[in-house]
Amino acid sequence: MHFHPIRQDAVLTSGYWCKDMVPAPPDKINDLAEESGMRFSPGIYEHAAALVGESPCTVSRDAALLFQAQYSAWQRYRHPMLVAGIDVYNIEPEILGAGLNSPGGSEVPSIISHPFAAVEKILQAEAPDPGRDGRMPMILDVAARLSRECQPAKVYVPICGPLAFGNGLVGMDEMLCTMMEDPDLVRRALLHLAEIQSSYVRAILKTGARPLIFESGASPPLLPPVLFPEIEAPALGRLFEVCRESGDPAPACILGGDVAPVLPHLLALNPGFLICPSETDQKNFVDMAAEYPHVEVRINMPVASILEPDWDKATAAADAAIALASRIKTGSVGTGVVPFNTSPDRLLRLRDYVENGDFETGSPFRYRNRDYVENSTKKKP
């Protein structure tokens, strides 16, 4: 593996002293990133399967492989957010009868049939038993193991947000049509789905992990912004309350897509963690999020920048994300879903660029703490 030249007193967050490339003590692994105040937090799901030479579908249904895949990813990248899962939108709908495909290669399983023909049937859905139903027991076991073995990383278990859950049960077309015809019915159905997640949330917290709510279907253009406060916000807010009531004071939520138009409504729900997707107006997003210093925000680089063969273009994307993240007290830099076949060397180099600085080429946004000057072009020694 090639590492670009770096300071001899730095500590790589991959766990090696850069001076002699021997493993660093666990309590020293993230010293430099903590000193600089910036972390690199890629979204590792199916890419973890690639690291153990298996398909995402195979890994998603095998406890030993899922642990091995995500543990291997953490050993390699030392990313601060570790997710015990791969096909994050499927777990709850599958338990209630959704059919999944079983793709080979690099594809992630997806829902191919929905158990309910109409939104009104959702009101009769019963809460899954996390200790017995579907893949929940397997995922909880993996989450507990990762929580023990991967300190100090934060381990998360993916759960469906209310609209994502509902889309998995009836399909997006049926859900959107019902929103137009009977928005109150959809609002009540989503509130019901938020309530029946409570047992799973409590079970997750008992493992030492935390729930990570995936709700990208609620973002424009999939959900018109005008419908967010009326239909989505009550249910998502209730799910945040469920998390807080269960012992998670800072609910984490992944809402991808063009989030900025609905961000004021989202921030009003008092989340603990959000992403700023590359698909939205990131400057506008940061302008609003900066007024909520308790909310952790991850500024996502475009996924294409991970695969970009031109290193200068890749680092330009990183610099833009760093500049935005540095405006938020708890900001970090990350990515959306890292593609299955991403080069580990490239991801490591991007991580080291964000956290430690690229001392070979220099960066206009290198700093040792959050008192840096954004437009400084001073090169590190």
Image: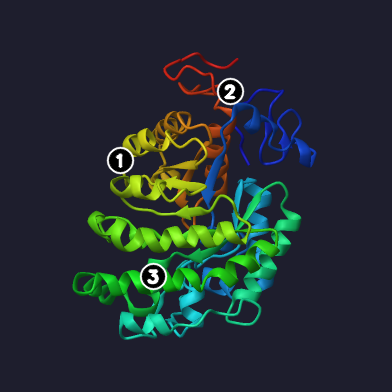
Asked if residue 312 lies left or right of residue 23, the reply is: left
Q: Distance between the Cα atoms at labels 1 and 2?
A: 26 Å
Q: The residue under label 2 is which amino acid type?
A: Asn
Q: Residues within 10 Å of mark 3 (few under 14, many from 20)?
A: many
Q: Dot 1: what SS?
A: loop
**x and y percent of residue 354 in the render?**
53, 33
Residue type marked 1 = Asp
Quadrant for the C terminus in the image: top right
What residue is pinned by disc 2?
Answer: 369
Q: Which mark is residue 281?
A: 1
Query: Percent position (x, y) of residue 76?
Result: 65, 49
What secondary structure is marked by label 2?
loop
Q: In x, y percent, where is residue 303?
A: 41, 48
Residue 6 as seen in the image, left or right of residue 317: right
Percent across and percent down for residue 199 are 59, 72
- The image's mark for residue 190 is 3
Q: Nearer the viewer, residue 50 or 195?
A: 195
Q: Is residue 301 above or below residue 326?
A: below
